[in-house]
Image (spheres, rainbow, N blue to C red):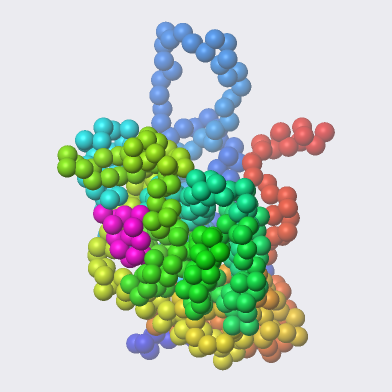
């Protein structure tokens, strides 16, 4: 029986049953409610509100009005609310527990940020309002831009990109625009990227019309300097490097890489998704970068996950700054001005990437995070993120094999060498973590590491939380090594959904709900 620190039982004695086989009359299991989609209710006549049918109004739909039932679910307000709250509880969230996903940087978003973003002066304004009425909002954008340039040691930043990948596109389009301006676009067509790069790097380069040439990693998990130099030539447009890289390691040769690519006439795109490991410690501008996106939603705490929202401001070197996308904010004596047209100070701009200003709500949250932390606080957040990752690495390395030697930056990377001959794979291990109440780590990325398990605790987690996580991981690791492969193959057994057919989900995704009668028609 588990006891709390007062010596009282913290939960009743478990009756020995196989929890996965318990049947209930309702189909519900404890507080996990078994229910269909909201469309699958058969009460179509009820509504949350009762409005009388309007009298004496002639249809203006010109014969296009609906002739059959609309088929919307008929639910009362409490039923609707409960359905969506229960749905939300099926979703794991950073507010429920640690999110050890590497590369994604899932950190706590202080409630203060939310409060600031909801101030009516920020939340209730409209992007088409006259500029004179939104000077405060423009000042938020401008102040955040100043901080981003200060922290990165750069002279320009494009604020409008709406995610990391969008920022990559911004940076690579600026490089392309510069090559066009210099008459080099036809000849410089090759972009170098390390094998361990995030998929968005090569995808962006290809989207911009470049071909991608991949650089191997050396045995320490970093860019192989000799192989990289051998690939330089007059057709190289640039290099895309993540630093710290996706193996959680600092690219020690970054200055030499920057100098070499510049000498060859190319540009240096830095993927800044892992900036959270070095904020306040090193300035990418000093490391020789020409463009770098900053995932505000990773580094500066704004919430993300489930596909959005994000924000990817992209800092630019002096060589690329004139090509920055519109719109942008500039200071004038009369106040802040919003530059939208490709003329004047924006005459060389490569164009526009998005309607309006970018992610205003994320700007407010990120600035709130920065100002409440201060320079010393942001530096400490980077240090704590690195410390936490190394603590996890050191504890887990007692049972699991690290992918590379030495300490890591903000994330710890393991391979599946330690699972050899156990019959348990990385996927099985991740599924067993769900039964233990933990969201799995990032699996099988980066691709350069066999069966990779990438763990990023961030600075959000306390030592107690890290210890709970490590204890569960180590317990599972010992079981895997002790030949309990069956348990891992069956996992998760305690989750509402058991093991899913992930191949089918990826190959034949069902993205649309079809009413049952339609489905039967389709089958005929
Ligand atoms: C997250 C991430 C990206 C992409 O950022 P999004 O905001 O998801 O578009 C690019 N590179 C790396 C290394 C990342 O971790």
Would residue 426 be visible to someone looking at this image? no
| Depth check, front residue: 123 or 234 | 234
Residue pushed farthest left? 333
Which residue is located at x 25 percent, y 36 percent?
131
Would residue 339 be visible to someone looking at this image? yes
| Depth check, front residue: 397 or 243 | 243
Q: Quadrant of residue 480?
A: bottom right
Relative side of 76 to 403, left or right: left
Across and down, in percent, residue 246 comes to 55, 71
Residue pushed farthest bottom? 398
Residue pushed farthest right? 524
Q: How many marks?
A: 0
Examine the rendered structure and indicate whether residue 179 appears above or below residue 476: above
Across and down, in percent, residue 169 comes to 52, 51
The answer to if 303 sits in the magenta stretch is no
The answer to if 151 sits in the magenta stretch is yes
Which residue is located at x 58 percent, y 19 percent?
66
Which residue is located at x 42 percent, y 73 percent?
277
Across and down, in percent, residue 433 comes to 58, 74
Which residue is located at x 24 percent, y 65 percent?
372
Q: Which residues are magenta?
A: 143-156
Magenta segment's dominant SS is helix
Examine the rendered structure and indicate whether residue 170 appears above or below residue 523: below
Examine the rendered structure and indicate whether residue 221 appears above or below residue 325: below
């Amino acid at each position: 029986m588990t006891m709390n620190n007062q010596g009282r039982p913290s939960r009743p004695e478990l009756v020995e049953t196989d929890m996965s086989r318990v049947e209930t009359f309702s189909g519900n299991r404890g507080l996990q409610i078994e229910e269909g989609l909201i469309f699958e209710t058969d009460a179509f006549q009820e509504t949350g509100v009762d409005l009388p049918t309007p009298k004496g109004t002639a249809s203006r739909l010109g014969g296009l009005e609906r002739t059959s039932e609309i088929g919307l679910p008929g639910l009362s307000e409490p039923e609707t609310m409960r359905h969506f709250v229960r749905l939300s509880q099926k979703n794991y969230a950073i507010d429920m527990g640690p999110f050890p996903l590497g590369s994604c940087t899932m950190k706590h978003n202080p409630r203060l940020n939310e409060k600031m973003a909801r101030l009516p002066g920020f939340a209730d304004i409209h992007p088409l309002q006259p500029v004179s009425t939104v000077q405060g909002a423009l000042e938020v954008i401008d102040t955040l831009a100043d901080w981003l340039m200060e922290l990165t040691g750069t002279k320009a930043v494009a604020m409008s990109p709406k995610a990391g990948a969008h920022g990559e596109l911004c940076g690579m389009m600026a490089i392309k625009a510069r090559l066009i301006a210099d008459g080099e676009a036809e000849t410089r067509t090759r972009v170098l990227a390390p094998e361990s790069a995030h998929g968005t790097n090569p995808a962006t380069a290809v989207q911009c019309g470049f071909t991608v040439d991949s650089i191997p990693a050396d045995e320490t998990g970093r860019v192989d300097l000799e192989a990289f130099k051998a690939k330089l030539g007059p057709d190289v447009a640039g290099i895309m490097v993540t630093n710290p890289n996706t193996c959680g390691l600092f690219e020690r040769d970054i200055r030499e890489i920057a100098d070499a690519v510049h000498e060859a006439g190319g540009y240096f795109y830095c993927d800044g998704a892992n900036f959270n490991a070095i904020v306040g410690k090193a300035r990418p501008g000093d490391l020789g970068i020409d463009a770098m996106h900053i995932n505000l939603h990773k580094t500066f705490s704004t919430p993300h996950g489930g596909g959005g929202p994000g924000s990817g401001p992209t800092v630019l070197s002096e060589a690329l700054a004139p090509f920055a996308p519109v719109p942008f904010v500039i200071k004038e004596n009369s106040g802040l001005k919003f530059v939208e047209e490709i003329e004047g100070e924006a005459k060389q701009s490569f164009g526009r990437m998005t309607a309006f200003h970018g992610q205003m709500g994320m700007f407010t949250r990120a600035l709130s995070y920065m100002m409440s932390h201060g320079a010393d606080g942001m530096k400490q957040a980077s240090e704590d993120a690195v410390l936490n990752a190394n603590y996890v690495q050191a504890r887990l390395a007692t049972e699991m094999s690290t992918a590379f030697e030495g300490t890591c930056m903000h994330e710890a990377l393991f391979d599946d060498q330690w699972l050899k001959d156990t019959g348990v794979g990385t996927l099985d291990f991740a599924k067993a973590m769900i039964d233990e109440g933990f969201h799995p780590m990032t699996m099988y990325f980066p691709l350069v590491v066999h069966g990779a398990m990438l763990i990023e605790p961030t600075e959000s987690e306390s030592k107690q939380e890290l210890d709970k996580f490590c204890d569960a991981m180590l317990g599972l690791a010992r079981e895997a090594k002790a030949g309990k492969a069956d348990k891992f193959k069956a996992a998760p057994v305690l989750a509402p959904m058991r093991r899913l057919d992930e191949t089918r989900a990826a190959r034949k995704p069902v993205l649309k709900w079809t009413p049952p009668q339609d489905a039967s028609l389709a089958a005929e």
